[in-house]
Image: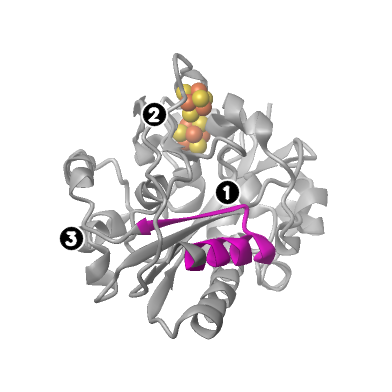
């Protein structure tokens, strides 16, 4: 089984993933209290999926019956230094290239096809931010890093600019040791630099105050008192990652689809203000912008508070 695991990991890297680890599927009972607390505090904003499927979130065999293994991959999206600041406007690094839902899913499907053809005719299911999987907890179980005080998975070799994807399968494999240490140490940069104090305590995010949530998931008009902190952010916020010392290790992505879309990089305020819906849909058909939609992006632009 260890040999099979090694072949899967080699293939994952060959496909362009930055890292791959494998954990034994089991109910994550140790996460139950944390999840319950988060839901009770209603820190999830409007993200109803957080409270739905509570048991499914903890138990992979409820997502895929007969689950034995969770294969976890990291896909690097780091576009290179400071590219997210374009013409004075800010777009989160993860949204500069193609929509990760498509890209990571496609690569995971290729990985699973390899497993079925070359290793064993296993059954399984692919996930990337698409179902109630506790992705970061599984990445820790698969030995890929620790959850930093900013609430994100930090990989000791590359930091946190990555997407996480999983294959839950009935194939028995050799497993990685969970990542038991954490290396934030005395650092508190992500907490102190967050402009809205959305990180209430280490690893506890109040999504209702988080710029990333407000500019992407939140459907209503952004509360006026939070507007000034948004400054020139059109989509998302990277501050609690940009200040993290571990992200000095980030290297540019080698996944071609994550190359920044030219129009986003070149856009200035006037361009955004003049963009109509049809043009928006055409330009961003493969981008996370399309998923968020024209109306929301337009309202972010209209509310910009540029100094
Ligand atoms: S994404 Fe921005 S607003 Fe949200 S917690 Fe991080 S620094 Fe704060
Ligand atoms: S900024 Fe500091 S405290 Fe926050 S996640 Fe990075 S190392 Fe940890």
Q: Which mark is residue 162?
A: 1
| Residue at x 49% of width, y 68% of height | 4
Chain-order first, disc 3 or disc 2: 3
Disc 2 and disc 1 in contact, CB within 8 angstroms: no
Please determine whether, in this image, residue 222 is positioned above or below residue 174. above
From the image, state whether disc 2 or disc 1 is nearer to you. Answer: 1
> Residue 242, image x and y in percent?
61, 31
Tag 1, which secondary structure? strand
Question: Horizontal placement of 251 versus 145: left or right?
Answer: right
Chain-order first, disc 2 or disc 1: 1
Q: Which residues are magenta?
A: 4-23
Query: Is residue 10 found inside the magenta-colored segment of the image?
Result: yes
Q: CA distance from mark 3 to mark 2?
A: 26 Å
Q: Quadrant of the C terminus?
A: top right
* Label 2 crowd (10 A; few <14 / some 14-19 / many >=20): many
In the rendered image, which residue does mark 3 sit on? 55
Question: Cβ(mark 2) to ligand 1 < 8 Å?
Answer: yes
Question: Horizontal placement of 191 versus 285: left or right?
Answer: left
| Residue at x 71% of width, y 52% of height | 273
| Residue at x 48% of width, y 17% of height | 187
Give whichever of 85, 282 is nearer the camera.
85
Chain-order first, disc 1 or disc 3: 3
């Amino acid at each position: 089984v260890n040999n099979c695991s090694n072949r899967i990991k080699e293939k994952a890297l060959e496909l362009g993933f930055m890292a791959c680890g494998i954990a034994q599927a089991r109910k994550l009972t140790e996460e139950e209290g944390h999840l319950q607390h988060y839901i009770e505090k209603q820190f999830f904003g409007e993200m109803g999926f957080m409270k739905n499927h509570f048991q499914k979130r903890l138990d992979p065999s409820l997502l895929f019956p007969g689950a034995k293994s969770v294969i976890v991959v990291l896909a690097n999206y780091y576009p290179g230094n400071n590219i997210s600041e374009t013409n004075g406007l800010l777009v989160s690094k993860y949204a500069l290239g193609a929509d990760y839902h498509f890209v990571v899913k496609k690569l995971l499907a290729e990985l699973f096809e390899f497993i079925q053809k070359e290793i064993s005719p296993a059954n399984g299911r692919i996930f990337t931010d698409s179902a109630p999987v506790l992705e970061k907890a599984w990445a820790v179980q698969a030995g890929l890093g620790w959850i930093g005080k900013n609430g994100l998975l930090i990989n000791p070799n590359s930091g946190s600019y990555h997407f996480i994807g999983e294959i839950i399968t009935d194939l028995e494999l050799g497993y990685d040791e969970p990542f038991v240490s954490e290396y934030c140490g005395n650092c508190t940069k992500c907490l102190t630099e967050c402009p809205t104090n959305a990180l209430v305590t280490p690893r506890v995010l109040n999504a209702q105050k988080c710029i990333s949530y407000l500019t992407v998931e939140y459907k209503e008009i952004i509360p006026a008192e939070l507007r000034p902190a948004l400054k020139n952010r059109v989509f998302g916020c990277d501050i609690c990652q940009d200040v993290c010392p571990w992200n000095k290790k980030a290297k540019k992505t080698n996944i071609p689809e994550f190359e920044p879309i030219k129009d986003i990089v070149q856009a200035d305020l006037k361009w955004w203000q003049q963009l109509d819906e049809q043009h928006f849909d055409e330009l961003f058909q493969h981008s996370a912008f399309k998923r968020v939609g024209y109306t929301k992006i337009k309202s972010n632009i209209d509310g910009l508070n540029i100094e």
